[in-house]
């Protein structure tokens, strides 16, 4: 089972906010023992205080904090105190992985940088997250990285203002990069017996995730523009439609065959053979006119029956759902964690491990 895969692994988490703690929770979900050390002098991880206005202000934790801190032993410590720092260093001697997002000078001052820890534990895998790399001390918050790496420029409606992605996606992308690097480092250690340092910056993780939008520039010198939900290369892909009952759907037609099936489902056979729409290139050029014709037909149908018909005919489509609707789905229930915080408060959160492994 997934949760037992890493049951012999010991992880010390010295990181805060989202990216590092997300990596720590990943290992916890796979059975590792994760010890999270938070700064006592600042009342713990800063995300404890990142509360919604409807959350109880007297509660010691926030919903944000709960999203990435399942399954950990959590201690508040003041590492400026020699005895508390010594205790943490003693724990690191027997650890497999350390997760850190210190500023380089802070890590060196405390003796918690990789160069200082390697002699204590030559098998240690040290996972480090920075904003722009180890030699750049700029502050790095997710929305800043969304701007610096081009995401914010591309996100939003045509002729509208930039729109931030609603989750700290750059942090999560960096977390995935760090997980991959640490797993490779553990594999290398199994082969050589030696630990290593894995370092990822939010900036590099963001650039690595630009995918086709980067190559649209690098190969075609096309600067991606804001297109809302639309895809620059495919149509109808990302177009939103309102159904008779007020529900919204989105289409993701990736090839000509799917377009033919969509037209059949909507009883628009003449559209399927129209010269302006028969191939994807023509659909991209004429997407506005196509959207108007599809909207007129979709507006005559209720959302759920239409989606059911699309799914039966292999047409990629989905409903726009809020969080309440998302977690009313049984598939979403399978991704939930029910657990208790150190003060006994029961909470729900979402698993970070989305894969299964069978033999």
Image: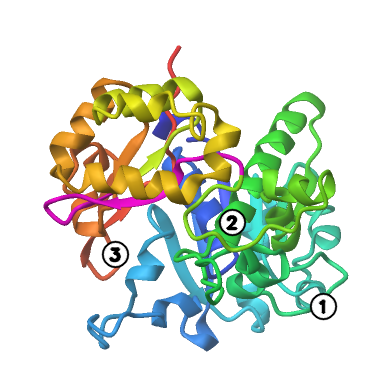
**Distance between the alpha carbons at the discs numbered 1 and 2:** 20 Å
Q: Nearer the viewer, residue 3 or 294?
A: 294
* Quadrant of residue 39 within the rendered picture: bottom right
- Going from the N terminus, do you reach mark 2 or mark 3 first? 2
* Number of other residues with Cα within 10 Å of mark 2, as a class: few under 14, some 14 to 19, many 20 or more: many
Q: Position of residue 180 (x, y in %)?
A: 65, 40
**Above or below for 319 versus 343:** above
Describe the element under mark 3 as helix, strand or loop: loop
Describe the element under mark 2 as helix, strand or loop: strand
Q: In the rendered image, is residue 86 in sight?
A: no
Quadrant location of the N terminus in the rendered image: top left
Identify the residue at horizontal 80%, vertical 72% (top origin).
Answer: 104
From the image, tell me which residue sits under label 2.
12
Identify the residue at horizontal 28%, vertical 85% (top origin).
Answer: 53
The answer to whether residue 202 is left or right of residue 263 is right
**Above or below for 302 versus 49:** above
* Eye-nearest disc, 1 or 2: 1
Q: Nearer the viewer, residue 320 or 171?
A: 320
- Which range is magenta? 233-249
- Going from the N terminus, do you reach mark 1 or mark 2 first? 2
Q: Nearer the viewer, residue 86 or 114?
A: 114
**Distance between the alpha carbons at the discs numbered 2 and 3:** 19 Å
From the image, tell me which residue sits under label 3.
341
The answer to whether residue 186 is left or right of residue 164 is right
**Above or below for 57 versus 232:** below
* Number of other residues with Cα within 10 Å of mark 3, as a class: few under 14, some 14 to 19, many 20 or more: some
Identify the residue at horizontal 51%, vertical 71% (top origin).
Answer: 163
Q: Nearer the viewer, residue 206 or 106?
A: 206
């Amino acid at each position: 089972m997934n949760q037992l895969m890493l049951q012999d692994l010991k992880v010390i988490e010295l990181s805060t906010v989202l990216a590092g703690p997300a990596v720590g929770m990943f290992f916890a979900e796979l059975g590792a023992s994760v010890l999270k050390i938070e700064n006592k002098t600042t009342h713990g991880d800063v995300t404890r205080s990142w509360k919604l206005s409807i959350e109880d202000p007297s509660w010691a934790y926030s919903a944000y904090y709960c999203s990435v801190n399942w399954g950990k032993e959590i201690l508040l410590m003041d590492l400026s105190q020699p005895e508390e720092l010594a205790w943490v260093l003693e724990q690191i001697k027997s650890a497999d992985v350390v997760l850190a997002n210190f500023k380089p000078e802070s890590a060196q001052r405390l003796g918690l940088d990789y160069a200082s820890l390697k002699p204590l534990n030559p098998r240690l895998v040290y996972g480090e997250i920075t904003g722009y790399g180890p030699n750049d001390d700029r502050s790095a918050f997710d929305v800043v990285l969304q701007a610096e790496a081009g995401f914010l420029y591309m996100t939003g409606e045509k002729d509208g203002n930039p729109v931030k992605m609603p989750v700290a996606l750059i942090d999560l992308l960096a977390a995935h990069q760090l997980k991959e690097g640490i797993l490779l480092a553990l594999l290398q250690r199994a082969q050589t017996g030696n630990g290593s340092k894995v370092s990822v910056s939010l900036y590099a993780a963001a650039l690595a995730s630009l995918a086709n939008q980067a190559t649209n520039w690098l190969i075609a010198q096309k600067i991606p523009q804001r297109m809302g939900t639309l895809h620059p290369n495919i149509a109808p892909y990302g177009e939103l439609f309102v159904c008779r009952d007020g529900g919204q759907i989105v289409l993701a037609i990736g090839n000509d065959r799917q377009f033919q099936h969509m037209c059949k489902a909507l009883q628009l056979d003449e559209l399927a053979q129209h010269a302006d729409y028969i191939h994807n290139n023509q659909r991209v050029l004429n997407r506005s006119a196509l959207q108007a014709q599809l909207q007129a037909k979709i507006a005559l149908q209720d959302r759920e029956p239409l989606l059911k018909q699309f799914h039966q005919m292999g047409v990629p489509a989905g409903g726009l759902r809020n969080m309440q609707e998302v977690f009313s789905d049984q598939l979403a229930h399978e991704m939930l964690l029910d657990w208790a915080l150190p003060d006994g408060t029961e909470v729900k959160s979402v698993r970070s491990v989305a894969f299964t492994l069978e033999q």
